[in-house]
Image (spheres, coloured by chain):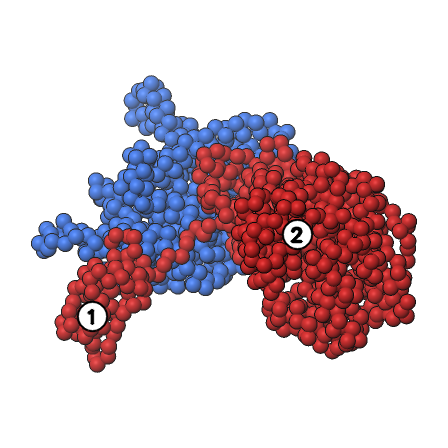
Chain colours: A blue, B red
Amino acid sequence: MAVLASTLRSSPDYEANRAAALDALEHVRELAEVVLAAGGQRSTTRHRERGKLLARERVDLLLDEDAPFLELSALGGAHDPSETPGVGVITGIGPVSGVECVVIANQPTVKGGTMNPTGVTKQLRALEIAAQNRLPVVSLVESGGADLPKQADIFVPAGRIFHDLTRLSAAGIPTVALVFGNATAGGAYVPGMSEYTVFVRNAARVFLGGPPLVKMAINEDVDEETLGGADMHARESGLADYLAADEHDAIRLGRQIVADLRWRKLGPGPSLAADEPLHDPEELLGCGPADLRRPVEARELLARVLDGSRLEEFKPLYGTTLVTGWGSICGFPVGVLANNGILFSAESRKGAHFIQLANARDTPLLFVQNITGFMVGSAYERGGIIKDGAKLINAVANSTVPHVTLMAGASYGAGNYGMSGKAYDPRFVFTWPSHRIAVMGGRELGGVMSIVRRGAAERSGTEYDEDADAAMRAEIEELIAAQSHAVYATGRVWDDGLIDPRDTRNVLGLALSAIHSAPVQGATHFAPFRM
Amino acid sequence: MSEAVPIRTLLVANRGEIACRVIRTAREMGIRTVAVHSDPDAGALHVRAGDVAVALGGSTSGESYLDQAKILAAAERAGADAIHPGYGFLAENAAFAEACAAAGIVFVGPSPEAIRTMGLKDLAKARAREAGVPVLEDAEIAGDDRDEWLAAAEPVGYPLLVKATAGGGGRGMRLVTEAGELADAVEGARREAGGAFGNADVFLERYLQVPRHIEIQVFGDSHGNVVHLLERECSIQRRHQKVIEECPSPAVDPELRERMGETAVALARSLGYVGAGTVEYLLDDSGDFFFLEMNTRLQVEHPVTEEVTGLDLVRLQLLVAQGEPLPFEQADVVASGHAIEARLYAESPAGGFSPTFGTMWRYEHASVPRIRYEDGIDSGSEVTTFYDPLLAKVVAHAPGRVEAAGRLALALRGMRLHGPCTNRDFLAAVLDGADFLAGETRTDFVDAHPELVEPGSRTPLLFHLAAAVAVSAHRRRATAPVAGHAPPGWRLLPGSPGRRATWREGDGESLELEYRLAASRLTLALEGETHEVVLGELGADGARVRHDGIERRCEVAVGPDGSVWVNDSETQSVWRQQPRLPETDEAVVSGNPVASIPGTVVAVHVAVGDRVESGQTLVVLEAMKMEHGSVAAAAGVVEAIHVEVGQYVEAHAKLVTLSQDGSGE
């Protein structure tokens, strides 16, 4: 198999790219600090004083010792100044008793553990990942219910959480709820819809309506423990399957429940040599473009991610701005499609061909996006670039092998779609700090709008206000820049996580391992290809 | 002059290292060997060393290795024509030597008469005096007149020792520093001697304050030849048992050696002594020496004599037992270099040298050159409390004393002894100590150096902790069923806290630590301090641990109970990780007894204030013609009873309130 060579260090852009990446990561570190503060010192101290574990400590204890945790949407909400990054719920994938599970943990120390709109999005995404990849779900429940001022953005979509939980269950995917504290009203349906429930004695309180509401509704005086305490649910209502002595006991029981699932992954295990890349992954910092007009050779990135830096290229001489080929990550075979410039007709046809081969071979696909779009211009339109782009999008959309998409650089226009962007149901999307995403670049968009408006002014015979035009262009450029930023994208949960480029192989390995919990089966039918 | 009778099959009536030692030489000489064993020793090393083995049955020494009839029956069954008794057990039992002769079996040792004579302290001393051997002033104690006792003590002088006539091993012995203590000491010694030996006779003997223990190895054959094989110094003793022995003694010059040797030979000659024997002396700082006793057997510490003389004493014993003459004369005995032996015991020096026991699941030598090991166990051996806890003897022989001590200490420190506590650290600390190296060795050595009992670790514990933590994490990752490729405890968010764990070294305090392990770098936060450690060649069984400019190769092994054993060339430590999620007592979640079904109370078995045990029936209900007992889930005190006999209760109704012990609920 061919081994990729590297000339990265001799690239004039390497140092600039690396510096920009480190700069961006510093910003990520600041955001992560806020996420890890879990609501701040005062809130966490008070929580601890009640003898409770922090949500992250619960997750750590639930996971196997020294196991990795692929946190999902970790910086969710980072785009919105009215939300706390991380939004008060931890979601991710990690091994519990040797079984990769989706873990969803409320953070009662963040804004009282209330649910906000991005929190709902995060949870639904985690449940979607569980369903697509056939991963058991363990919920660590302690929630203060909806953030009431934002209830309009929460109430309707949040219902889907309970829908998804029971659909998982129906699909044979186990669901476990460990209840550490309050789970009121809608929240009560997390244990309600879960297959196994563990309630912590003297701490779990689960009821549809709390004492004040009960008093209001039926004038009954009742305390919380009597109304929805763990003892009551374990002995009388039967909502609690296991009564735990304390939080540690609950987590121990949760781990035992998962161990007793006798879970078997249905995808093939890692089957190829999982040796480290030959080239230093540290240099991945220089593989993301600081300036989108100066793309980085895609093979340099692949040489630091693929096992042994091995890539057997498919059609290396044809459609050269799209690199396609076979390799593996942490022993899992993958087909790779990586942008190495804008997409032309040949690249689109090559990509569509390659995706069909991967489906015929039941091989997962890795898309590496660094794409400013499909080529425009009359020659290309005449050459049928839309027809060819349609072939690629047809292949991507109807492919049933798992896709993992890495947003390494630009993701503009229909290039995003042709390279299995978020809307095309990739199993996972991970983002580098150098990533930019939009329908087109801010400068281009401002320019386009200027041309359109100028044309309209000419047609109506009015004088075009050049000052207003400049202001408009600057404003658009600024807005697009803000909304196409990697942190904005990850805050919106357009991806599953903003990652340190140096962690890429590890993250992709964890994602591929989780993916193989479900069978890997290629499509037998695509839509008719427009020839 | 007796005819030479070759020994073809030798039964070794012993266990442990000495059985292995005798079997080794016998096999070298082409002699078939028979091992014997008790029930607990069925899998022991010496049993596997013999060509055949015979089970004696029984567990205690009395039921097995001391049972003469069983030993003789085993010899007959296995076709043995000779018995080597080793040391201890039947080695100095004249009756057994006679029984062997009666059964036509060669007893590898001196005549029953010599054994008997030297076995009685007063008789032995008299014979020594007759043979011109210097003896300590002594006096007989007879009758119950205390004034007579005081008068008898007068010529002996104080301090003096009250000793049991039939004694040994320090039993029935009392030190008396002034006349006022004499009466109590005599009575106490009589009581103890009577209990231990069935003979309450005691005598008084002059006591040397801090002498050295020097002994002369003698050898005689049935052709009238008697030689001595130099001295051994065995002053380092604990609980009256030698732990470190050496040859030659740093306190014996050639002239003294010659005098001591000559007197020892004279005593042996006077006994018509055949075989290996040892004449023990006390030597004071003025160079005067006094007869202590004679041991009519091979000594535990014989290897140091072998190393220095180049002779095989077991071979000589067997030759002589076959009636052959000693193959050399006194003038041929030449000393070369210096040899030191350390006795490795399963015992706790810090716990007053009390014996320890358990499975020694890993027993391995250090990679130190030219060390002689006399092993009594191997990996997996069970150390029981039935017998002497000697595990092995470790011997170093070098041109000089300091070199021998240094090499022996290195060997001891580097041994992998994964199992019950041993005296290894104590031994190494003695050997490395300035006083030992200066030859300042007297019988009070151990008492005078209490700091050696818990010498502390030469390797800072951090190295071993780092090795234990890193290797454990590495092992967990390597055996993880999924996602094994990921670094230990990897987290996506930068600045995430490290993994938390609680470890405990031996019986020490629990250490709460936080660690991060990435590639070869371990960051360990411990008691408010953060340590950076670099790990080379991290694998499932160790790493090169570098910290603070020093690198140590740390070997890590995990015991069957999950204990983590770390060895470097200087120290061993054992670590246990506390479970992250300890099992909770089931009872805690069972809560107070409630009615499991609706029914009528037919009996209440407790009253308020009663202390109840877990599982005790508190209340009996009847429903559907069946009785249902409601039991206490945990021990506690009855705080309230909510029902009475005849009352009908609903399901889940609270029957009794128990306060759990100490919880105050």
Q: Is residue B52 left or right of residue A254?
A: right
The one nearer the camera, A497 or A444, is: A497
The one nearer the camera, A324 or A450, is: A324
Q: Quadrant of residue B32?
A: bottom right
Amino acid at dot 2: Ala
Residue B604 disc label: 1
Whichever of callouts 1 and 2 sits on the residue coming sooner in the sequence is: 2
Gap in Å between the C-alphas at discs 1 and 2?
A: 76 Å
- Contact? badges 1 and 2 (CB < 8 Å): no
Q: Which residue does the image show at 69% across and 48% down from the upper left?
A: B137
Regarding mark 2 in the picture, which secondary structure is present there?
strand
The residue most toward the top is A467
Q: Which residue does the image show at 33% across and 57% down from the upper left?
A: A244
Have a look at marks 1 and 2 and say if they share a chain: yes
Q: Which residue does the image show at 84% across and 70% down from the upper left?
A: B7
Q: Residues within 10 Å of mark 2 (few under 14, many from 20)?
A: many
Residue B198 horizontal/vertical position (percent): 60, 65
Residue B6 horizontal/vertical position (percent): 87, 70
What residue is shown with label 2?
B139
Amino acid at dot 1: Val
Residue B551 horizontal/vertical position (percent): 64, 37
Q: Quadrant of residue B67?
A: bottom right
Parent chain of label 2: B
The one nearer the camera, B69 or B546, is: B69
Against B606, residue A153 (above or below) is: above
Residue B420 disc label: none
The residue most toward the left is A219
Q: Residues within 10 Å of mark 1 (few under 14, many from 20)?
A: some
